[in-house]
Amino acid sequence: MFQAVFQTLALAGTLALQPAAPAPSSPEPDDARAFMDSLADADSRIDSMTGAIQFVVIKALESDLQKRNGQLYLRTLRDEQTGDEHRDYAVRFNLLQLDDRQSDIREHYIFDGRYFVERLPDEKQFNKRELVPAGEELDPMELMREAPFWVSLGRNTDRVFDSYDIDLLEHSDGLADNEDYPELEYLIETVVDTQQIKLSPKPDSDVADDWEWVRIWFDRESMLPKLYVKADWTGDLQIVQLFSVKTNVELDPLLFDTTTPPPESGWRTQISAWRGDAEPTTHTETIEYQVVEPEE
């Protein structure tokens, strides 16, 4: 489930700091291109981002609701000499609601371009999966189907248009009077004065089977992301809301640390190494490890 944590983060990373002009009621494709270009331009100015996050998963067939609350983190590292950029994503959940039951949790997820890490401090469990070989980085767009965080659309605008049909819509579209998803109506009041974009996988693209559509709402004045809703072909929903988003603030580097606990520690580790098209090699070992938690 929680490779999905990082898909949402990458989408939210498409922030823009300048206001966007209101979209017409029936925008042409050029309007969608202009909007996406404005997000790409703004994304280039984001050094860091953090905000409160609520991540909701609704399983249609099981009538099951899971809600997690926590904090989202993003940082961009730039090489001033080469101009190359690297982006890390992290999310920390501290509250879990399963239907009517609520409990405190500690679940930490990190994606650094090569590794996806799940850290569960309460269970002293560390899971690490190598997604690409050494020397390469995975495009966060590859995590669109699996991760619970935003993926930066603006970092690869052409690829988005190659794989998805993009529509600019009114803020209430898909939320009001939606016979398929009536549970979304409560979100209307949270997205007033926003611009909605809808991504639908193209039938002949390599993402056609991933999900039916994803909708993202950006504040019209600040261009910061506020809401993300993704519908699976099964009818399942992922809903991500961001609150009190801040950009270009100092973040503790430990938030993005994917280092495997050393052998002398007390953590259980499960490491899945890259093996190309073959199944990844997985081993599990028990180790003693005193974790130093970054400051919140």
Image (spheres, helix red, strand yellow):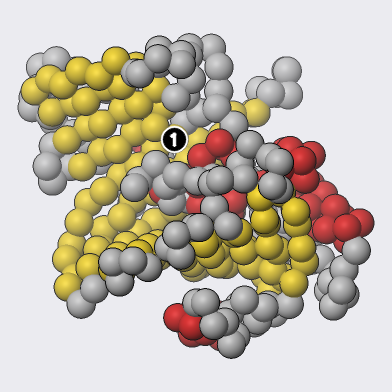
118 to the left or right of 215: left
Q: Is residue 141 left or right of residue 255?
A: right
**Picture layout, residue 146 above or below residue 184:** above
In the figure, residue 115 lies in which quadrant?
top left
Q: Residue at x 31, y 28 (%)?
A: 128
Q: Is the residue 192 above or below the residue 99 in the image?
A: below
Residue 170 horizontal/vertical position (percent) = 73, 77
Query: Residue drawn at (61%, 42%), measured in percent from left and top?
Result: 207
Towards the viewer: 244 or 272: 272
Crowdedness of circle 1 by 10 Å Cα count: few (<14), some, many (20+)? many
Quarter-wise, where is residue 290 in the image?
A: top left
170 left or right, relative to 128:
right
At label 1, the amino acid type is Phe
| Residue 222 percent coordinates (x, y) | 70, 66
Residue located 57% across and 67% down the image: 226
Q: Is residue 250 visible?
A: no
Residue 189 in sight: yes
Image coordinates of residue 73 in percent, x first then y, are: 46, 48
Residue to which mark 1 is pinned: 111
Examine the image and state in which quarter residue 171 appears.
Answer: bottom right
Left or right of 252? Residue 7 is right
User: Residue 166 location, x and y as percent?
Assistant: 75, 57
**Residue occupying the point 21% across, 25% down:** 270
Q: Secondary structure at mark 1?
A: strand
Please count the marks in the image: 1
